[in-house]
Amino acid sequence: MTSYATQGFNLDDSGRRIVVDPVTRIEGHMRCEVNLDANNVIRNAVSTGTMWRGLEVILKGRDPRDAWAFVERICGVCTGCHALASVRAVEDALGIKIPKNAHLIREMMAKTLQVHDHVVHFYHLHALDWVDVVSALNADPKKTSELQQLVSPSHPLSSPGYFRDIQNRLKKFVESGQLGPFMNGYWGNKSYILPPEANLMAVTHYLEALDLQKEWVKIHTIFGGKNPHPNYLVGGVPCAINLDGNGAVGAPITMDRLNFIKARIDEMETFNRNVYLPDVLAIGTLYKQAGWLHGGGLAATNVSDYGEYPKVNYDKSTDQLPGGAILNGNWDEIHPVDPRDPEQVQEFVTHSWYKYADESKGLHPWDGVTESNFELGAKTKGSKTNIEQIDESAKYSWIKAPRWRGHAMEVGPLSRYILAYAHAKKGNQNAQRPKEQLDYAAEMINHAFPKALGLPATDYTLKQMLPSTIGRTLARCLESQYCGEMLGNDWHELVANIKAGDTATANVEKWDPSTWPKEAKGVGLVAAPRGQLGHWIRIKDGKIENYQCVVPTTWNGSPRDAKGQIGAFEAALLGTPMTNPEQPLEVLRTLHSFDPCLACSTHVMSEDGRELTTVKVR
Ligand code: NFE
Ligand code: MG
């Protein structure tokens, strides 16, 4: 028995151990082990990143203006957010201010990513933890049509015939035995509680979302040339504006293209409002009624975000989703977060496969060190290439352990929404962040959450219910909706600014490294879809001296630290009862609610490409 009293979690690793490896429907390589008590309740959890790629090491000695193109390859899912963090870090170091159009275009690219990422996450990476595809075959298409008209009254595709066609497509799929994206689900598990009609409706929306998402990312192709991995530029954006397109070379931003973008934004807003939010509310309500409100973990205590979406660039007080840190579940106190302060953001490697001179201490990212050190603990069972069980008392993950003032934190949309609610309650609005703007986020929490959960909107009920797996999924949906609306505002502002005669998209005054100081350091922050993202850079003699990325999934997927504090994935699993431990659906539900991205968090392969683990559920 191990006790981690500092966080109030008591871990018991004595019971039967279940291994889920890999955790699928996510980006990257992740393993999770849990110990169960005699009642099949999770009492200990161990989360591991099983891959290393070394991007921070690859960057050393390179031109800072090129860094965005390297770090952007950390991930194709949260595509663009590492490039954005990178150009912001370099601009911060060199004192470069970007033009208004560049700011608005970057904002639109970031919010497009947010909506795309959240919709793809919910329907394609997470919904099948709640929705039984095979059960949809038993649905009555007429009743499905009635259900949809009840929960999504404005959805244009609602006829019984439409659902019958989709059901027939599904039947053919299942009869062919080639389930494709629906392979290996735990279909029929008793923990799926939706009626067949709700399952058919949700599977239908899965297919609709699959079609739509490829349209939405065209916004990235217009502004950034391609997706995934759109182009960025230190000093602005790499696209030209020429509204009528006359005499322009390349592929400038024309009014035709802007109108195409507006049509996609309207489509996102309509889908969020008519389909995504009603689906999440319906699924949340039914599962809440069935008593499934597990998975709160660190969200009930420690959450943070750097704050994002400034109405006025470079003015953090105008952030439309304001940042801060909340500790010990005290929503009345919001601590300011300063990523430059060496005492605040630190990464520990005590339980990570890296080497520090003194591993009892954390390092601020400007002084961060990335040196691999793969060794397995004495208690690891099995051979090195076929591990049955890892030893969490030793090093056990390729993910470092970031901490804020020494505390393990949960990051992501749920954290941002808890913060928005707390800021609104304190009345933290100003002229650039009008009350309505901030209240909007709080309103959503006040209305959407209690409605979904069938509760009165009080601080007490929200605190009991919001920090949960369902709460996390709801918050992501609210953020998608909010980003869709902010996108519409950005579009109008961009068009108005261009029409007023401003066509500047880049500031190249400091492009030449001879204009740079001998030494400089900077930080670039982004509200990435999975949470707060920061890149820290040190520049010396025009080259990158050190580069460190502390990524959302590094925070959430963090292993234990020097004090033994567990990370957000691990904390969220504790106390969850499993219906059938041979089918770890509950583990997947909660882990998926974070939308883990291991490629992002490890950003660093075992040198000899050796297999570190095998797939095993026992
Ligand atoms: Ni690969 Fe990422 C996001 C970043 S990691 S997805 O969002 O940054 O959590
Ligand atoms: Mg890192």
Image (cartoon, rainbow, N blue to C red):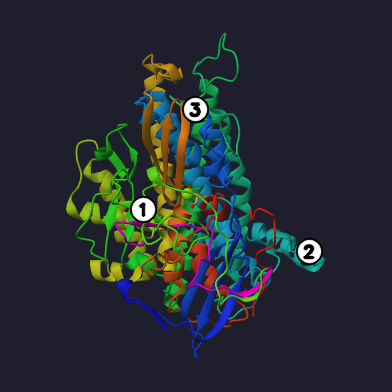
Three-letter code for the amino acid on which mark 1 is drawn: Gln
Question: Where residue 500 sits in the image (x, y, percent)?
Answer: 36, 16
- Residue at (65%, 57%) from the top-left corner? 162
Look at the image and tell me whether residue 468 can be seen: yes
Mark 1 or mark 2: name the one nearer the start of the chain.
2
Dot 3 crowding, Cα within 10 Å, few <14, some 14–19, many 20+: many
Asked if 100 appears above or below 31 in the picture, the reply is above
Asked if 327 appears above or below 248 in the picture, the reply is below
Q: As drawn, which residue projects farthest toward the bottom?
A: 38
Three-letter code for the amino acid on which mark 3 is drawn: Arg
| Residue tagged 3 | 65
Three-letter code for the amino acid on which mark 2 is drawn: Gln
Asked if 519 appears above or below 206 in the picture, the reply is above
User: CB atoms at circles 1 and 2 under 8 Å apart?
Assistant: no
Mark 1 or mark 3: name the one nearer the start of the chain.
3
Checking the image for residue 424, the label placed there is: none
Question: Where residue 89 sits in the image (x, y, percent)?
Answer: 41, 35
Mark 2 or mark 3: name the one nearer the start of the chain.
3
Residue 325 located left or right of residue 483: left
For label 3, the SS is helix
| Residue tagged 2 | 178
Question: Where residue 366 sits in the image (x, y, percent)?
Answer: 38, 42
| Residue tagged 1 | 346
Residues shaded magenta: 385-408
Residue 409 located left or right of residue 53: left
